[in-house]
């Protein structure tokens, strides 16, 4: 039992809102002490775009005189440079593309990514809905959420659970083959 539990000290600010209820009884506080945290590295990377002083034009875009500034990540740039060196024909093909075609290709990749995410979401929800017991368990988890958020949260939890199962199955398969498992 927590020595600073609200049952002994009802005005304790650290434990005011974290009581567990069992039936009509109020249980002791579940937080008995603060868990130690791992120290975070002191390096700080700031990635932000400067604020525009020009107001947006009627079309919703920034004024033409305002050019956007883009972030640069050295690790990503190194990967891109390595890919370009390994694939010079593809790089020549990309450089020969007209600007409109390049823009449409970028948009197409975004549309494909959204479609992929939607297919995964629908597959997770279909799998959950196929099993009535699993569906009840997920609905119990989200029972206190607003109705418009429930389906999205169920899909999120289902995706995380699916990844966790796949990860543990992959680790189990590696162990049975005698391979090392990295964490």
Image (cartoon, rainbow, N blue to C red):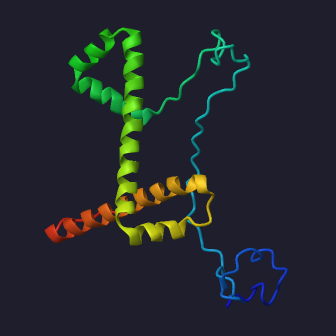
Q: Quadrant of the N terminus?
A: bottom right
In the foreground, 1 or 118? 118
Q: Quadrant of residue 109?
A: top left
Across and down, in percent, residue 17 comes to 74, 74
At 34% from the left and 59% from the top, the residue drawn is 127
- Left or right: 110 with respect to 19? left
Image quadrant where residue 20 sits: bottom right
Q: Position of residue 152 (x, y in %)?
A: 51, 52
Q: Residue at x 30, y 9 (%)?
A: 96
Q: Is residue 18 above or below residue 167?
A: below
* Nearer-the-camera pick, 3 or 180: 3
Vertical placement of residue 79 versus 139, above or below:
above
17 left or right of 154 in image: right
Residue 25 vs 49, above or below: the answer is below
Q: Is residue 77 above or below residue 100?
A: below
Percent x, y of residue 117: 40, 43
Q: Residue at x 78, y 89 (%)?
A: 7
């Amino acid at each position: 039992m927590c020595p600073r539990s609200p049952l002994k000290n009802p005005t304790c600010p650290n434990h005011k809102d974290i009581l567990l209820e069992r039936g009509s009884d109020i249980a002791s506080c579940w937080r008995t002490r603060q868990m130690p945290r791992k120290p975070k590295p002191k390096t700080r990377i700031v990635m932000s775009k400067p604020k525009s002083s020009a107001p947006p034009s009627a079309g919703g875009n920034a004024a033409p005189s305002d050019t956007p500034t883009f972030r640069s990540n050295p690790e990503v740039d190194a990967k891109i440079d390595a890919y370009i060196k390994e694939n010079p024909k593809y790089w020549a093909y990309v450089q020969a593309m007209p600007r409109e075609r390049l823009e449409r290709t970028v948009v197409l990749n975004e549309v494909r990514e959204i479609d992929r995410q939607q297919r995964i979401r629908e597959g997770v929800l279909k799998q959950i809905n196929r099993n009535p017991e699993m569906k009840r368990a997920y609905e119990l988890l989200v029972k206190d959420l607003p109705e418009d958020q429930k389906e999205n949260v169920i899909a999120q939890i289902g995706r995380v659970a699916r990844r966790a199962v796949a990860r543990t199955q992959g680790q189990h398969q590696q162990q049975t083959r005698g391979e090392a498992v990295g964490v």
